[in-house]
Each structure stands twice: as structure tokens, then as C-alpha cells.
Image: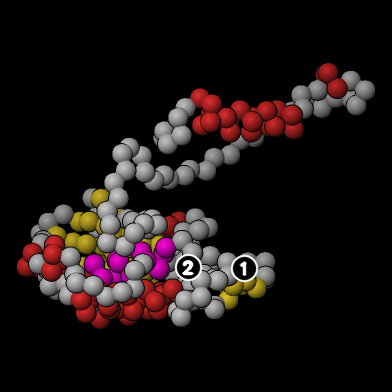
Amino acid sequence: MNTNTAPAPAILSTYGYTAADQQKMHDTYRHLHANPELSMQESGTAAFLLQRLQELGLEAFPCGGTGVVGVLRNGDGPVVGFRADTDGLPIAENTGLDFASTATGTLEDGTAVPVMHGCGHDTHMSVALASAELLARSTDKWAGTVVFLFQPGEETAAGAKAMLADGLWEKAPKPEVIYGQHVWPGVAGGLEISSGTAMAMADSWRITVIGKQAHGSQPEKSIDPIVLGAHMIVRIQTILSRKSRPGTPQ
């Protein structure tokens, strides 16, 4: 994130967004960047988010352990979700920034590790909070309900499950659509346009290869799952590089 205060874009100025608001978002970003927490351990982050949402007058509550939800109601209209992830990564920051993270955390196996927001979640949270503030004070320009979802444990895929298991959609209005964001390296103040697929999501799936045992002197009577698994890895890996163009959705 560019941390230099600049005039607010014209489209935001119509909603009363000022350079002071932009500086506030930058200050929020710096705070969150300097204080990252590991997946499902984001207690300090959750407390910060909860306080900020309550100060804005939103219905705010924890969900899924360290997840946070804020509901902004503004009369009749569509229900829209805005999602931001909150966890940091177990890596050391060597940026040299004056707000660089010096935080540490403990993995599930007890290993002590440095922690950094190296995947943009600090930016996601900062933009979500700024959006909540902008919408909360501009209720004359829109109608409906916005549900702000601050999801923990994105890096481990545990946070979304925890929020759903905690009754997320019983506690908050269910949106018709949920928007998210992902930061991308570029030149501040510029605009980049990509044709076709630009980002991707990933699904996990599990394959069980079942073999057949035989005596070591008669390997031809066996079905070796190790060899079959090796062939499958090679074939699957070459789908993208040899069977379709890179960038084509799989």
C-alpha cells in the first residue's frame, strides 16, 4: 500500500472521503501490518476490528473464535457481503520499514516463529474498515444491508469453516453476493487491466490409490500403488503445460 497521503479520488470525494480519511486508513494499515497474528490466533486483531466497527455504530460481534462480523443496515434493499481475511504468515519481515513486524507466534507443534502480513491481509482489513466508515456516514446515498466479514484462518482454511459452524448465517443476514479483494503489485496511482482470467481460487481433493500385494519374487502379480501414484503426479502436472494454455481455468 502506498502510504503517502494524496488527494482522494473524485468518485470517493462525492461520498465525503477526504485526505484525512485516507491518512486514517494508512494509519490503520500500519497498525495491522506491525501486529500480525497466526491463523486462528488473531485475538488482538479481532479486538481491534470489533472496537472499530462498534465505534462506527455497526452491529458487531465475534464469530468462529477470532472472526468478526459487522452488519450495517440502511433500510430496504439488497444484502451485500464484503469479506476480508485477517491472519498473518509464519515468516520474518526484512523490509526495513519503520512499521515492520517484529511479532512472533507459536505454531500448533509448539515451534516459535516470526509473523508477518506477507499476503496483503492487512490491506484487506484496512480497506474493509474504510469502506464501513464511508458507507456508515453516507447512508443518504445508498440503501440495503452490508455485512462485513473478517475471516480468520484463511491460510489454513480453518476460519471459514469455524464461522459457519458458529452459526454465521443465523447471526447475520445472508448476502445475495459477497465481494472480496486481492492486492497485486503495481505502480501507485496507475490502473492495470487484464483480459480473461486474472486470479484463481483453489480446491483441494484427495485420491486413494489401492494396490495389490504379491511376493517379492513375483512383482508382476502385484499392483504397485507407488508407481501408479508417481505416474498420476506426472500426468496431472502436464495437463496445464502440455494440454492447455497457461492461464486457462482448469
Q: Which residues are magenta?
A: 120-131
Tell me if 226 is positioned left or right of 199 in this view. Answer: right
Quadrant position of the N terminus in the picture: bottom left
Crowding at dot 1, Cα within 10 Å, few <14 / some 14-19 / many 20+, comes out as few
According to the picture, the residue beneath numbered tag 1 turns out to be: 107
Crowding at dot 2, Cα within 10 Å, few <14 / some 14-19 / many 20+, comes out as many
Total marks placed: 2
According to the picture, the residue beneath numbered tag 2 turns out to be: 117
Tell me if 181 is positioned left or right of 206 in this view. Answer: left
Name the spot of residue 189 as percent of width and height, x first.
27, 61
Q: Is residue 122 magenta?
A: yes
Is there any visible trace of residue 243 in the rendered image? Answer: yes
Residue in the picture at 23% in, 50% down: 176
Q: Nearer the viewer, residue 93 or 161?
A: 93
Magenta stretch prevailing secondary structure: helix
Quadrant position of the C terminus in the picture: top left
Amino acid of disc 2: His
Is there any visible trace of residue 150 in the rendered image? Answer: no
Name the spot of residue 209 as percent of width and height, x first.
67, 31
Q: Is residue 172 magenta?
A: no
Q: Nearer the viewer, residue 186 or 179?
A: 186
Q: Residue furthest right?
A: 217
Name the spot of residue 8 as percent of width and height, x first.
19, 70
Amino acid of disc 1: Leu
Residue in the picture at 54% in, 26% down: 242
Secondary structure of the residue carrying numbered label 2: loop
Residue 219 placement: quadrant: top right
Secondary structure of the residue carrying numbered label 1: loop
Name the spot of residue 193 as percent of width and height, x first.
29, 46
